[in-house]
Image (cartoon, rainbow, N blue to C red):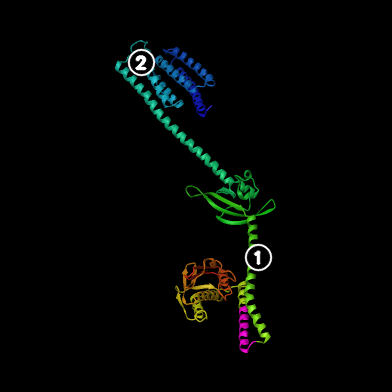
Amino acid sequence: MSEDAVALKIKIKALIVFRAVFITLLAGSFHLFIEYEKSQYVQALYYLTVTLYILTVIYSLLLVKIRNLVAFAYTQLVLDVIFEIILIYTTGGIDSWFSFTLILTVISSIIILNKKAGYIIATCSSILYGILVNLQFHQVLPMTSDIVTEEKEYLYKLFVHIISFYLTAYLSGYLSSRLEKTVQKLEEKDIDLRDLEVFNREVVESLPSGIFTTDIKGNVLIFNRTAEKITGIKKDSIIGRSIDLLIPYFKFPFFEGRKEDIIVVKGVQKIIGLGISTLKGADESPKGYIGIFQDLTQIKKLEAGMKQKEKMAAIGELASNIAHEIRNPLASLKGSIEMLKEDSVPKNYKERLMEIALNEMERLDRIISDFLTYSRPAHPEFKIFDLHRLLDETLELLKNVEQNKGHVFIKKNYQGNIEVNADPQKMRQVFWNLGLNALEAMPEGGELVVATRNAGDVIEISFKDSGIGINKENVEKIFYPFFTTKEHGTGLGLAIAYRIVEEHKGMIKVDSSPGAGTVFEIILPRTDGKE
């Protein structure tokens, strides 16, 4: 049986029950308020009531067997109209109190069937009621009322009744259709909401991260499958209970943000990443908390393995670069010493060989010193000093180095008076390395602009040159130890500068392109170094 048939069957059953209740109330009120002996039509009402009770029983029995429920409903409604006409005739005809029962039947037809049925029953009621009052008016049927009514009053009362039947059909049909549309829309919304609820539940349950939500007091509302798997706690045992009672490491009250923690599940340690955010309602007021967490144990193991491999690779590359940097001066030194040992070269050439040997030894000493500075940096000694004064001293030294040769114009672009809290000797080394690097990038001359800026919580120092620039593929490598594109460079100057700036909890950025020059920018916190 279809859903429509089931619904119609329920409505017909309700009609049967309503009819039985109405008959009972009508008969009971009659005996309660009307004197039985003085009534003119008590016997007729008695037979009518009994007949309707019998029909009600028959309807109830047939309801189980009848297949054409629509025809069955129409039959009941038409018979109701007939019995109501009999009731109206018995109780006074056009002056009867019970003409309202026809209106009830019109309303019932619309509720049970549809708007069309309402007009059919209204038409049926109008025809039968019109026939009844006309037969009485022309005395074809005996009058059941002592009141004599003129023709115009008959016609008026008949007109009013017929209009009331159709108006009832129209209004009831309109309200019924609107109600049906509203119900249909609500059902569609309900289906959509149920589908959305199922979808959301499936999404939450299928997420690879553990998710829980709590109310404002910390009682758990949602706890998905992944959360069960990570924590080893079943959903049924935690829903509705305070989360920190069963999972102590999720301490309540929560604070928004992300953190990592170690938990123990069945004797096994797990590293989890937990993010907490506030669950807000439509009015932006807090309703509870949302927690999203992941098991990071394997990821952390992989990260540790990767870091170890990167560390070993970096050590290998560093060793290779050290060997390369030391091998070159050693080869020159060895060749010079061997030629001096043979004592077969002219005196003036011996002096040249000795000069080469001494230069290569100085180069070796510089490489080792720079490497020790990079690998074993001294702890910075912080003090407050005038930044511009330190820069002036460094730039004055740069004007006289061999790499400058007077071809590079140094311009200062300072902003106000700036004092910093840093290690002046280490910062001097940073400025020296950056300045020297800029001079070496301008072998044919150019301009070096050194600028400072007080940017609130940070201080910015920039070195901008108009030199040859850096290739794109080399920009990311310039701070690597022993990486250099210069013929005589060690590749440690920028690496040392980078490490010193990191020690000061600052950062150093570079922007460069071939032929367009290079800008190095140092960013230092104003109160850096206070530990």
Residue 197 painted magenta: no
Q: Is residue 37 above or below residue 121?
A: above
* Mark toward the viewer: 1 or 2: 1
Instruction: Report the Cα–Cα distance between label 1 and label 2.
Output: 112 Å
Residue 363 painted magenta: yes
Q: Position of residue 41 (x, y in %)?
A: 42, 13
Label 1 environment density (alpha carbons within 10 Å; few <14, some 14–19, many ≥20)? few
Mark toward the start of the polypeptide (1 vs 2): 2
The residue located at (38%, 13%) in the rendering is: 144
The residue located at (65%, 57%) in the rendering is: 301
Which quarter of the rendered picture does the N terminus lie within?
A: top right
- Residue highlighted by disc 1: 312
What amino acid is labelled 1 in the image? Answer: Met
Residue 133 has which mark? 2
Q: Position of residue 241 (x, y in %)?
A: 61, 46
Q: Is residue 74 above or below residue 425?
A: above
Residue extending farthest to the bottom is 347
Q: Is residue 361 left or right of residue 436?
A: right
CB under 8 Å between discs 1 and 2: no
Q: Is residue 452 left or right of residue 531?
A: left
User: Which residues are drawn in magenta?
Assistant: 345-365
- Badge 1 marks a residue whose secondary structure is helix
What secondary structure prevails in the magenta region?
A: helix
What amino acid is labelled 2 in the image? Answer: Val
Tell me if I can see residue 525 in this picture: no
Q: Position of residue 78 (x, y in %)?
A: 44, 19
